[in-house]
Amino acid sequence: MKPRTAFILLLLGAVSLGLGWYAGIARDTMGEVTANAATLAFPDFAARMAAAQRLEIADHSKTLVLVREADRWLLAEHGNFPALAPRVHTLLAGLAELKLVEKRTDDPAEFARLGVDDPRDAKSEAREVRVLDAKGAALAAIILGHTRPSPENGGAAQVFVRRVGENQVWLAEGTVEADPDLSGWIDHQIVNIARDQVASITIDRDTSHLVLTREGDKLVVSTPATHPVLDQLKIDTLARGLEYLSFSDTRAASAPLGQKLGTITFVTTDGLTLRAAISVEGETVWAIFTPSGKDKAQAMADALGKKFNGFALAVPSWQAKTILPSLDDLLPPATPTPPPAAVMPATPTPAMPGQPPAPR
């Protein structure tokens, strides 16, 4: 190769390297500019978050309202039962960190396609979130639409949003966990006490008084002393009444709860007494729990009282059917009476030749 040709090739290689380096820097710089240019949906929300006093989450079928009391958030339409604090903090942090990264449509005809139409519309898939101060002024108000994964591996999730009162739709980065379903805002479990830890059960209804006490590895009916043979499987099911006992809704204990049915009192082997006053309203069974304890069970009784005193809890229907039985409810299933045997008609005896037929 001639020296001049070699020099030219070397020069071209250096230029190519330089252009590649410049292009790489340009791409990196462009990425930085794009990321830094992303605007917070609510630039001053983090600084004003301490002023938040009310949180509203709504979709087309339901609205969840939380109100602030000191350092707690309470479920206003569910007897002011305390909401899970981490869930509230996650939602507020998500709003504070939500970034608007790309403008999309401002045509209302396109809102439904992106899930940011009016959440009050029966067909809407949108959710609206409002954070208000003590005077009812909005600190943040946004409509959340359809989500999609980040185009970058491991990047932040993306969601279409529209700030309340605006037509501009944005593609935003971040996660705002806003669901108006009560189930995600409460700790559903009441207690979880195994059957073999139940020492006695007392059931009082208008016309009956039942006491079940432990004999060895099972509970038996001790009051009334005389009773028919009972179904031990049903008694064992009753003894499991505190296993994974949960609730699905709450009200203030002072609220109307329908028809009062009676009370059931569980006493455990370690000294916990848990009394439940039972009422029924339509398909819903409400229980007001009163815990007390001694010795090792005192701490548990105090914790249950702190969490549930002043509230009525809606217990699941499958537990409600066995939570307040009468003595008749503990009887074995009735043995069906077999149907009477079918009587076959007699077969007539054929007549001998020359004789009249036998009478029928």
Image (cartoon, grey):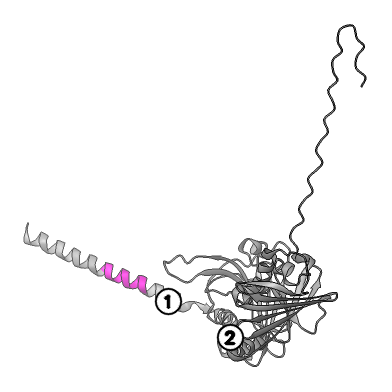
- The answer to whether residue 180 shows anywhere in this view is no
Residue positioned 64% across, 67% down in the render: 116
Which residue in the structure is indicated by mark 1?
33
The residue located at (80%, 72%) in the rendering is: 280
Identify the image quadrant of the C terminus: top right
Front-most of 276 and 331? Answer: 331
Q: Residue 32 in the image: state x and y as whole percent.
A: 40, 76
Residue under the point 74% across and 66% down: 330
Nearest the viewer among 222 and 14 is 222
Q: CA distance from mark 1 to mark 2?
A: 23 Å
Magenta segment includes 55 = no
Magenta stretch, overall SS: helix
Q: Is residue 288 visible?
A: yes
Which label sits on residue 45? 2
The N terminus appears in which quarter of the rendering? bottom left
Residue at the location (90% across, 17% down)?
Answer: 358
Q: Which portion, as a residue range, is magenta?
A: 19-28
